[in-house]
Amino acid sequence: MVRFIGLEGVGTKYELETKSGDKIAVIFLLNKRIQVYIQEKSCEKPCSIEITEMEAKRLSSILGGVPIEKERESVEIDFMGVPDLTLAMHTYTVSKKLHGKTIEELAIRKRTGANIVAVSRSGKTIISPPPHLIFEEGDVIVVIGDKEQIEKFEKEILGI
């Protein structure tokens, strides 16, 4: 069971007690920081850490079973109102193999069903890149599709 406690002037606290009696508390502070407290049943004092919003999001992904790999990140989203809809979004770093080629030339959507929804290049993000965008080595691309489309993209386009 999770308890919600409003902490006036401080933030919001969520407490969870596990079946074994261990306790976890997460406090979302007004200054956008997040404190995490863990207290094992056998311990008198809790251990605590403070993390950023981004770190909390990554921890949430990890706890939800989403793999995070160096140079690649992935998120799978299940939509509660549509039980058979799962959307996968992955990031990849463009290698020499794709350098100089366009989305259109690679026929990514036609060959795999996956879509390139964003490209990060030199600190700038291109949302919904046009088909004539030329990939540069080191670009980080965001690919979206279902699990099979992502696997097909990795095999047919990236060769992994």
Image (spheres, rainbow, N blue to C red):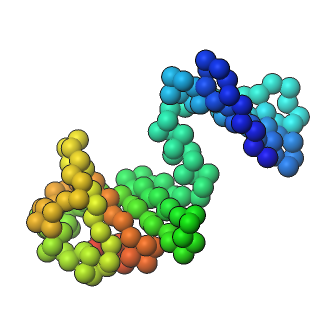
Q: Nearer the viewer, residue 108 or 129?
A: 129
x then y, percent, for residue 97 = 20, 67
Please give the name of the residue rendered at 62% of the width and 51% of the height, measured from the top-left corner.
63
x then y, percent, for residue 133 = 13, 61
Q: Nearer the viewer, residue 159 or 48?
A: 48
x then y, percent, for residue 79 = 53, 64
Q: Is residue 86 visible?
A: yes
Seen in the picture, residue 113 relative to 96 is either above or below; the reply is below
Give left or right: position of 77 versus 154.
right
Q: Is residue 50 visible?
A: no
Seen in the picture, residue 19 relative to 80 is either above or below; the reply is above
x then y, percent, for residue 123 = 23, 41
Please give the name of the residue rendered at 53% of the width and 27% of the height, measured from the top-left corner.
33
Seen in the picture, residue 20 relative to 51 is either above or below; the reply is below
Give left or right: position of 113 versus 66.
left
Please give the name of the residue rendered at 27% of the width and 64% of the height, measured from the top-left corner.
116
Give left or right: position of 148 versus 103.
right
**Res 110 → quadrant:** bottom left
Please give the name of the residue rendered at 50% of the width and 72% of the height, measured from the top-left corner.
85
